[in-house]
Image (spheres, rainbow, N blue to C red):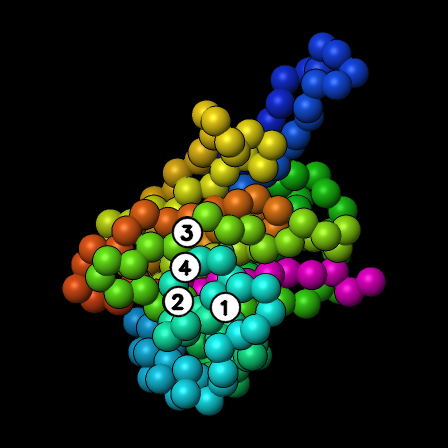
Amino acid sequence: MKIFTFKSGPPLTPFAPQWDYSLGYENISNLIDCPKIANLILSKEKFIIRKFPVMKRGSIDGYTALGPNSLTSRYWYYNLIDWPEIEIKTLRSTIVEFHQKFLKKLNIKIFNTISIRGWANVMRKGEKIQPHLHNVKPDAYLSGHVTIQCEDTATFYINPVNQLNEPEVKKIKNVPGQIALFPSCVPHYTDTHSAATERITIAFDISLKM
Ligand SMILES: [Fe+2]
């Protein structure tokens, strides 16, 4: 697992900002079946879009700007992580294991009682995900992505404290089968997907059962 940390230097004044946000990422393509998961998502995409209305909570598409016809704009209505297919069950247990490994690496007490909500993003030529974040409320925990299918794109993570004039940004190249975990308050975006095949990712939020 690779870890990247946005970390402030020791504060020299009582008002100097402090931050410490770690991202973890690793290739898990040997553990999950990306081609089968890609087919599964594409086979359900139209059905999900037809079945559920455009969201009316805050933003229609989670501030990604993928628009009202995107699968992303239905993310609130279903939990991909609960799909019954064996490939998704394996994906779920792989996420759980990666989460435990991530906490161990950061010397954080392991929480066993988590729940995971996931959805799929299918992007076509010319599309990109605009900067957005998942949770800044007191229960904010971790979010993640698993790249299922991609060609020459990257995800960019912004330091939550330093995101205006000269933002501190960490670029992580998208690789099929790569999982990334990051604090839910870290804003992120992608560059433009330019390939003819779909760019497919699974995004998820982990929350602690309190
Ligand atoms: Fe996101």
What residue type is disc 3 on?
Gln
Query: Which residue position holds label 2?
Result: 67
Q: Cβ–Cβ below 8 Å for labels 4 and 2?
A: yes
Query: Does residue 121 lie above or below 157 as drawn?
Result: below
Residue ranking furthest to the top: 12
Q: List x then y, in percent, for residue 140.
A: 70, 52
Q: Residues within 10 Å of mark 2 (few under 14, many from 20)?
A: some
What residue type is disc 1 on?
Ile
Which segment is the magenta one? 201-210
Query: Which residue position holds label 3?
Result: 130
Query: Which residue position holds label 1?
Result: 60
**What's the mark number on residue 144?**
none
Q: Cβ–Cβ below 8 Å for labels 3 and 4?
A: yes
| Sequence-earlier tag: 1 or 2 | 1
Query: Does residue 62 lie above or below 48 as drawn?
Result: above
Q: Residues within 10 Å of mark 1 (few under 14, many from 20)?
A: many
Q: List x then y, in percent, for residue 64.
A: 44, 58
Of helix, strand and loop, which one carries label 1? loop
Of helix, strand and loop, which one carries label 3? loop
**What's the mark number on residue 65?**
4
Of helix, strand and loop, which one carries label 4? loop
| Sequence-earlier tag: 3 or 4 | 4
- Disc 1 versus disc 4: distance between alpha carbons? 9 Å
Magenta segment: does it hold 204?
yes
